[in-house]
Amino acid sequence: MANPFIGRRINYGIAKESTRGTFATATYWLPWRGGSHDDKFDVLSDESTLGVIEGVTGAAVSKTWSEGSLELLVRDTSFGLILLSLFGTDTKTTTSGETVVYDHTFTVAQSAQHQSLSIVKKDDVQTFGYTGGVVTSLEIEAKPDDFVVATVGLKAKGGSAQSGTTSYSSDTYTFTRSTCTVVRAASLAGLTSGTAVSVKEVKIKLTPGVVDDDVLGSSTPNDFLNTSFMVEAEFTLKYTDATIHDFVANQTATWYRIQFQNSTTLGVSAKPTLYFDFSSVKHDSWERKDELGKVVMQTIKIVGKYSTTDTSMVKAVLRNSLATAY
């Protein structure tokens, strides 16, 4: 029996699976600051009567899996594996003007099976591995008093004893308020020189519509499958004119880029960067907030729409020093 220990002793690692559902040793260990990932159970109650008034007379486990969410700082390298499982496709190119800096462009794979992950949980009691894992949701938030933070939803098969040696040397760069910019334009190409939007807070939420592939003959889901991919974002900014209001009222065709960039130079001039490009969006809602003694604010919510012109709804680009695709 191990001695009692605190949550700071728990380590989480992830790896890309070469064979779906077959354990892979962790390639990235994730510094985390909240959440958990653990085994879950569906337990049936047998309420058949035995001639007494007591309501439950038996029980059996009908389903086992693992699930949870982890709160992490967005980092320049390991985050790519999370994006790969979420989007499904990573295309690596050398960043323009560079030789040792690379752009990893993540696009939505038109498949029900996006990249599976092995998840490792290592603590003072045991090291557990969870296979066939997928990202079920990703929320990213940037606000003035914190780092850029991600909450990653995960699902996988039930855990089993594994081994793993922790190493936190892969990730170097994080992102803060000064690294965040929002740009809008009238086309995808226009985002490179679009109109800057001064915002107070940004939230991005991506959901790949994961469902359990439950089958007879096993208490464990056969797989975790993607269905309908959705993305939305929310901006809070000062109310200084009616532009945003009119975008919603008129459903003005608008493209957005939300970008986070660390100030460190990696090669000639490129910097660690993560950005999301939204093709022409649905301006879903607008709300103005009037308070005595405070600056009048507004919040807009956008929802991604698939663009036949861009053949995309949203893509993510992660710029770092990783020379191979995830």
Image (cartoon, rainbow, N blue to C red):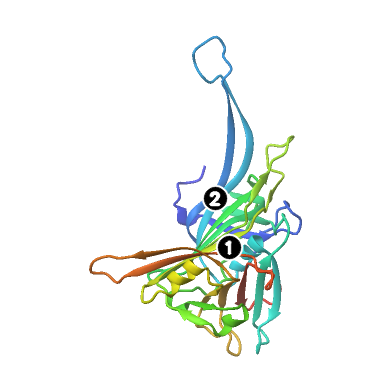
What residue is shown with label 2? 68
Q: Residues within 10 Å of mark 1 (few under 14, many from 20)?
A: many
Residue 161 image offset from top left, x and y in percent: 64, 47
Question: Which disc number belongs to residue 29?
Answer: 1
Q: Which residue of the protein is positioned furthest toward the top in this rendering? A: 51
Which type of secondary structure does the marked residue at label 2 adopt?
strand
Q: Amino acid at mark 2?
A: Gly
| Residue 268, picture quadrant | bottom right
| Residue visible at 60% across and 46% down in the picture | 66
Q: CA distance from mark 1 to mark 2?
A: 17 Å
Q: Is residue 175 above or below residue 58?
A: below
Q: Is residue 250 above or below residue 93?
A: above
Residue 246 image offset from top left, x and y in percent: 45, 71
Q: Which residue of the protein is positioned furthest toward the right in this rendering? A: 19
Q: Residue 6 versus residue 63: which sits nearer the camera?
A: 63
Residue 197 image offset from top left, x and y in percent: 45, 78
Q: Residues within 10 Å of mark 2 (few under 14, many from 20)?
A: some
Residue 252 image offset from top left, x and y in percent: 53, 72
| Residue 293, picture quadrant | bottom left
Q: Residue 286 versus residue 148: which sits nearer the camera?
A: 286
Question: Which disc number belongs to residue 287?
Answer: none
Q: Residue 53 versus residue 111: which sits nearer the camera?
A: 111
Q: Which residue of the protein is positioned furthest toward the left in this rendering? A: 293
Instruction: Check whether the beta carbons of the residues at disc 1 and disc 2 lie within 8 A of each other.
Output: no
| Residue visible at 36% across and 73% down in the picture | 239
* One can see residue 26 in this view: no
Nearer the observer: mark 1 or 2; the answer is 2
Q: Amino acid at mark 1?
A: Trp
